[in-house]
Image (spheres, rainbow, N blue to C red):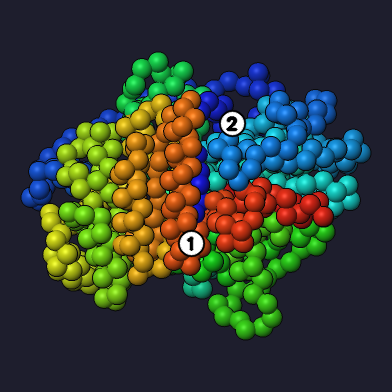
Amino acid sequence: MATSLLHLSRPRRALLPISSLRLPLSTQSHAPSPSPSTSPTPSSARRLPHFLSFLAAAAATGGATVALCDSGLDHHRVGGKDSADLVVRGERKHVPQEFIDELATFFGDNMTLDYEERSFHGTPQNSFHKAVNVPDVVVFPSSQDEVQKIVMACNKYKVPIVPYGGATSIEGHTLAPHGGVCIDMTLMKKIKSLNVEDMDVVVEPGVGWIELNEYLKPYGLFFPLDPGKNLAIVSNSIFTCFDGFKCMFSSHYHSVETPIEPSSYLEDGPGATIGGMCATRCSGSLAVRYGTMRDNVINLRAVLPNGDVVKTGNRARKSAAGYDLARLIIGSEGTLGVITEVTLRLQKLPSHSVVAMCNFKTIKDAADVAIATMLSGIQVSRVELLDEVQIKAINMANGKTLPEVPTLMFEFIGTEAYALEQTLLVQKIANKHHGSDFVFVEEPDAKAELWKIRKEALWAGFAMKPDHEAMITDVCVPLSRLAECISTSKRLLDASPLTCLVIAHAGDGNFHTIILFDPSQDDQRKEAERLNHFMVDTALSMEVPGEGVGHRVTQDDEKNKDRVGSQQHHESGKADPTSRLHMTL
């Protein structure tokens, strides 16, 4: 049950080219925002219900001094399981000058002691988790050998390590509560080899999943994980976005609530990287069809805390020899090593797909249809659920007129005949559970427009409460308990004075709650915490785990311990500082 805090208006400096990262912040200038793009001219298309008329148009378009851990926060230990501040406690550790000098001989300009840069790397870009310290130094290796040098130096001087990927995680993974070294993997972004006939690819950890799929597209292949996370830059603010969104945004950059159009405000930013996706064992909407990161990695290389390099296997798809070390490292969140190379399993691009949507009177009916669809053996690639509050947010943010009721979205892939057959079978299932307004589209632009409803769900939520933060929960239950768990949680959420939205990867029993609250109101923050703990306890009563940084909280609850999970995670290496490794998405 991952608990995350987001605030759309949190100020951030814009991402800069890697060569600029060693310059003092005051010497850097921001690139101008791109000009608005021309909107496509709408025209008629196949007949659709009035509330989906927007699809018709889409279908018709084809030298610093060392200042250690000077974060400005008190260095004493703070936080606790019942704290609503979400401050990760840590112990400031002295980093010797000899260590800094040794790194400088290896990396020269590819390291920085600039406080602005260290603070940027040590402060989550999409989370309000905090740490009492920031990294003492940020290093940018360009090869596995350089990663080894960093880790061996850290082992020698007993300095904590925080590897750093695309920084799109909303779970506070970029925190450095003990200070130490932040290893930014940005420069390690080579695609080392593509084996089309074997349907695998070998990449470095800094490669983004979006860029990788662009590279693979001409070969008719794709990497099937879809974490849906990439960064967008709005003026001097930076935050996670999806394929584009339109929402209400309010901050000191915009004194009034203003609709934001991606074409006029957003610059492209990096997305989740392969190394971080491995370290956090990410999944996404396609996991119901293709599995999670664990199922799509053939082998990997990692630098262990003592500097040794381990390769977990070869490119063969099967092996019964020895320990399955790849699955051990995947999901370890960097605590076992720094990932330096990954061999990924690829899939063939589907020849045809259909996207469908259906409305329901109750969220239980919608969940029941998701369960019945999976039990029927129909091979869906996505099954996503949005509650009526989420649909209302989408209507507010995008000017749509969707019925504000629980809604299921599906994607079917395969040949044209097969995808259509599966679509009609699901329509029959939906009709048996009081489904209505079942529609499906096959035109590429119409599919993309319809699917944006789900991809923009989080940001649409901020249109309802532009000045609020969002606490995001992540609950995963056995599929047979999904309807019960969502219904139980929904009754409490609806009774709360806070605005709460539910979205779910319903095909594999995973759902999120977006709890919006005013950060200046202590009672609202405590209410958000209460709702989160309720859902954790509800899921635990079903004997199931949680996901993300919040799953550490769940593990604590299971073990009846008194510490916040993320704190326990960071403290787990207390006896051996070299085990303090933490890879980020």
Identify which residue is drawn at 62% across, 84% down.
Answer: 320
> Residue 324 at what x, y percent from top left?
64, 75
Q: Is residue 385 left or right of residue 10?
A: left
Secondary structure of the residue carrying tag 1 is helix
> Residue 346 — which label?
none
* Residue 134: quadrant of the picture: top right
- Does residue 513 sit above or below 121 in this rendering? below
The nearer-to-camera label among 2 and 1 is 1
Whether residue 70 can be seen here: yes
Packing grade of label 1 (10 A; few <14, some 14-19, many >=20) is some
* Residue situated furthest top in the rendering: 255
Q: Is residue 313 left or right of residue 137?
A: left
Pick the front one: 550 or 399: 550
Q: Is residue 103 left or right of residue 563?
A: right
* Residue 358: quadrant of the picture: bottom left
**Amino acid under disc 1:** Leu
**Amino acid under disc 2:** Leu
Disc 2 marks which residue?
16
- In space, the residues marked 2 and 1 are separated at their CA atoms by 43 Å
> Residue 540 — which label?
1
Identify which residue is drawn at 53% across, 25% down.
Answer: 11
* Residue 217: quadrant of the picture: bottom left
> Residue 283 at what x, y percent from top left?
47, 59
